[in-house]
Image: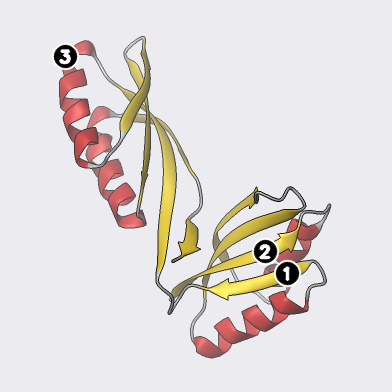
């Protein structure tokens, strides 16, 4: 089962490598990782999605993270009310006659055409993982040229 964990860390050189190394050394795969500074530039917020087979593995991961010297706090969103989102940027082929159809698809998913030039549209969308997956399925009819996704980000209520 996939679990979403947030980790507040000191924004220092090598912290990300130590966190990633912790997962790697124990054979845990990171399914998604997003990192950014907080409002305090000395602190970073990591959102990590990990595939943990059971609660015991998840507890081990959290304990190991808490042992790292630069870790301030670890939050497991598994049983907490939270909001989670992903961001995608997609480049699709889009002739002028397809533009209305494309905008109809984007309207269902709160997506937006960011730029349209030379029959190529760059689209941005933010949503839950399932919504993003459905949007990409519909966009495949327009021939996707390039796709970039963020990892999942999450915030507790």
Could you tell me residue 54's position as x and y percent? Answer: 49, 86
Q: Which residue is mark 2?
A: 8
Q: Residue 20's x, y, as percent?
A: 70, 63
Q: Quadrant of the N terminus?
A: bottom left
Vertical arrangement, residue 134 with respect to residue 72, above or below: above
- Quadrant of the image containing the C terminus: bottom left
Say whether residue 119 is left or right of residue 99: right
- Mark 2 surroundings: few (<14), some (14-19) or many (≥20) residues within 10 A: some
At horizontal 73% and vertical 69% (from top left) the residue drawn is: 72
| Residue denoted by label 3 | 97
Question: Gap in Å between the C-alphas at discs 2 and 3?
Answer: 48 Å
The x, y position of residue 123, in whole percent, is: 36, 29
**Mark closest to the chain's N terminus, 2 or 3:** 2
Residue matched to label 1: 72
Give the mark nearer the N terminus: 2 vs 1: 2
Q: Are marks 2 and 1 in contact (CB under 8 Å)?
A: yes
Q: Quadrant of residue 112?
A: top left
Left or right of 26? Residue 141 is left
């Amino acid at each position: 089962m996939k679990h979403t964990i947030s980790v507040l860390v000191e924004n220092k050189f090598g912290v990300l490598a130590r966190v990633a190394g912790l997962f790697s050394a124990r054979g845990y795969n990171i399914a998604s990782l997003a990192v950014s500074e907080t409002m305090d530039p000395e602190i970073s917020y990591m959102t990590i999605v990990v595939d943990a087979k059971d609660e015991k593995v998840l507890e081990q991961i959290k304990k190991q993270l808490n042992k790292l010297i630069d870790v301030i706090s670890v939050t497991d969103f598994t049983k907490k009310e939270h909001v989670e989102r992903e961001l995608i940027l997609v480049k699709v082929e889009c002739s002028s006659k397809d533009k209305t159809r494309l905008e109809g698809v984007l309207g269902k998913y709160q997506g937006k055409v960011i730029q349209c030039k030379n029959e190529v549209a760059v689209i941005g969308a933010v949503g839950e993982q399932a919504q993003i997956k459905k949007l990409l399925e519909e966009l495949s009819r327009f021939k996707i040229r390039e796709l970039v996704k963020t990892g999942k980000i999450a915030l507790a209520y």
